[in-house]
Amino acid sequence: MAWIKPRRMLRAPDSTVTALDADGAELQIDGLFCAVCANRVTASLSRLDGVKSASCDLESAIATVRLSGAVDEEALRQAVFDAAYAKPLRRAAERAARAVGL
């Protein structure tokens, strides 16, 4: 396994919707480094209204979403951002604040 530089881990993942129709969507995710993030992306996408199922492949960095209703492209991208970057970073900041007594 290659060493991941911490600076790269703090970069927000960038997702691009490469396919979107009534049945499903596919997103290319740049900045996905580990299986934990891939699982968070899968869970976050699965929680969206109108999503039947979701999966995220770490090696190809592609998330595949099966839809049961209409889903906005921006909602898909925001779910990826929230799962892989915003929540873990916020939790780390909260732990650091508690450690110093804030």
Image (cartoon, rainbow, N blue to C red):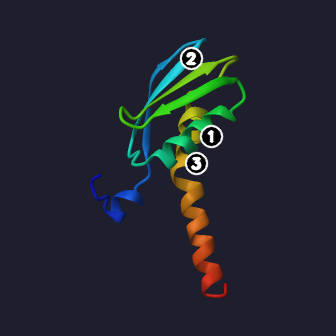
**Residue 85 drawn at (x, y percent):** 51, 53
Question: Who's the residue at 60% across and 19% down the image?
Answer: 66
Outermost front residue? 1
Q: Is residue 50 left or right of residue 35?
A: right
Whichever of labels 3 and 1 marks the residue nearer the N terminus, that label is 1
Q: Residues within 10 Å of mark 2 (few under 14, many from 20)?
A: some
Residue 75, percent across and down? 61, 34
Q: Secondary structure at mark 2?
A: strand
Q: CA distance from mark 2 to mark 1?
A: 16 Å
Horizontal and vertical percent position of residue 11: 40, 56
Look at 61% across and 65% down and name the residue there.
91
Q: CA distance from mark 3 to mark 1?
A: 8 Å
Give the numbered dot on residue 44: 1
> Which image quarter is the C terminus in?
bottom right
Which of the numbered marks, if any, corresponds to residue 82? 3
Residue on which the image places disc 2: 24
Q: Residue furthest right?
A: 49
Q: Nearer the viewer, residue 44 or 35?
A: 35
Under mark 1, the amino acid is Ser
At a point 57% along the width and 36% down the height, the residue shown is 42
Give the residue type that dot 2 points to: Gly
Lower sequence index among marks 2 and 1: 2
